[in-house]
Amino acid sequence: MGRLALLAIGLTLLATSATAAGRAAPVEDYENVPMPPGFQVVVTELEGPVFADARGHTLYTWPSRRMRNGYTGEAKGVPACFNEKSTENAGLMSPYPPGLLLPDLDTRPTCTEAWPVAVAPADAKPVGAFSIVMRKDGIRQWQYNDHPLYTSFFDRRPGDVLGGTTRSGRAAGNYAWRTPIQPPEKTPSGITVATTAAGRRLVTVGKMSIYVYDKDTPKASACTGQCELSFPPVLAPAAAMAKGEWTTIQRAPGVKQWAFRGQPLYRHAADIERMSMVGGDEPGWSVVYTMKAPPLPPGFTFKETDAGTVVADSRGMTVYKYVCADDALDQLLCDHPKTSQAYRIAICGGGDQARCLREFPPVLAPEGAKSGSNAWGTMYLDPATGHEAAPGDKRALHVWTFRDRPVYTYAGDKFAGDTDGDSRGEFNGARQGFNALFVRDDYFGKAD
């Protein structure tokens, strides 16, 4: 059995162990910090703990980001999202010049309709890292670490994080994405948590993976000698004390090693790229998660491909997601069926929705299908337009969704394990296009 096969099996076991032996799966701990009245922390399935408003809706920032031809997003303390509708593209992403008319202007929301302001009451006072900025429209807006705060019109329920991600690279897209804000992690100095396809993973502050060894015990390491050269221990200061899920073991007199949930921690000497997971391909070794991603819905599985391990449908065919953000100053998302479908139809059908249905058909879901998580779900799509349809519409397609967006297969994939639909679109699908649902975040660069 190949290493990718072992990985796929391991990911399946990790995902389905959420309620093993009648116990709830562990969730990520965090530091309690002062918050404005009504604010709260919600532990979400895919992003871990996030700050939310009184309704439980996730709070986001819009950090400034350099694009190909300028900057968009917000500088600290300078709100740039107002009740104004963009009508033309901004030319931030060459080769498209500025001034092109945006599609579906009659239904396009203003920036604050898509991203409602987190309004601070008139008597609100700064607390902790939360402060207040006066906007040019006269609204007092909450900030976090001087970044103005918003909610997303995509989020409907507490625990939804559908407007952005804390992941980076290809997963976040080649645009100025919105970022959910999170309380400080409860980790020792030098260790942090990264959001990945398979869950919230422990890494060093330099984003190098951390591993555990299945031969260890909570009080002793079995990795010594040559093993220790391949997997150096994550050392703790001599004065380090146990706290919560974090403990130490003594490797030698005066030498301590960090342990998380009773498992001593290591790095891998062969990891030379950020987020590399190759140490987890070694027998007996695993990467470490504070929270694992929820299990796949019935009918989905993991599949080995030449490009990496992907999510596949019941036939073993690779599953794809569509990503999109428009080239306007407000960088509104266009990847959801409630937004303009002109972009998606241009990519997959050259302007023809019928061709899109043939080229990238959505994965159909049985009536009454349940996923068991917020991350995966179902919706009804109007096949003529690609927009969300009412459940009673007899023409509608009932399809599976991930993060409330439909998932697809690709007609060009002839055999199980093909990934020919990956990276189809603008900038190799990074700003607008189709990407396979890979389940590894490592040096191959495949991240969802």
Image (cartoon, grey):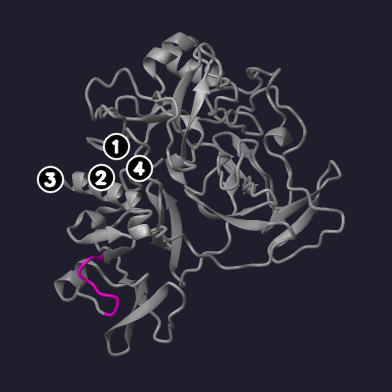
Which x, y percent locates residue 138? 86, 44
- Mark 3 sits on what residue? 1
Question: Disc 4 versus disc 2: distance between alpha carbons?
Answer: 18 Å
Up-down: is 74 above or below 366? below
Image disc number at residue 442: none
Mark closer to the chain start, 4 or 3: 3
* Magenta region, residue range: 213-219
- Mark 4 sits on what residue? 445
> Residue at position x 62%, y 33% from top?
331
Q: Nearer the viewer, mark 4 or mark 2?
A: 2
Q: Quadrant of residue 341?
A: top right
Image disc number at residue 301: 1
Circle 3 SS class: loop
- Mark 2 sits on what residue? 8
Q: Nearer the viewer, mark 3 or mark 1?
A: 1
Question: Disc 2 versus disc 1: distance between alpha carbons?
Answer: 9 Å
Up-down: is 4 above or below 241? above
Question: Disc 4 versus disc 3: distance between alpha carbons?
Answer: 24 Å
Which x, y percent locates residue 313? 31, 30
Mark closer to the chain start, 1 or 4: 1
Answer yes or no: do the residues labelled 3 and 2 have beta carbons within 8 Å?
A: no
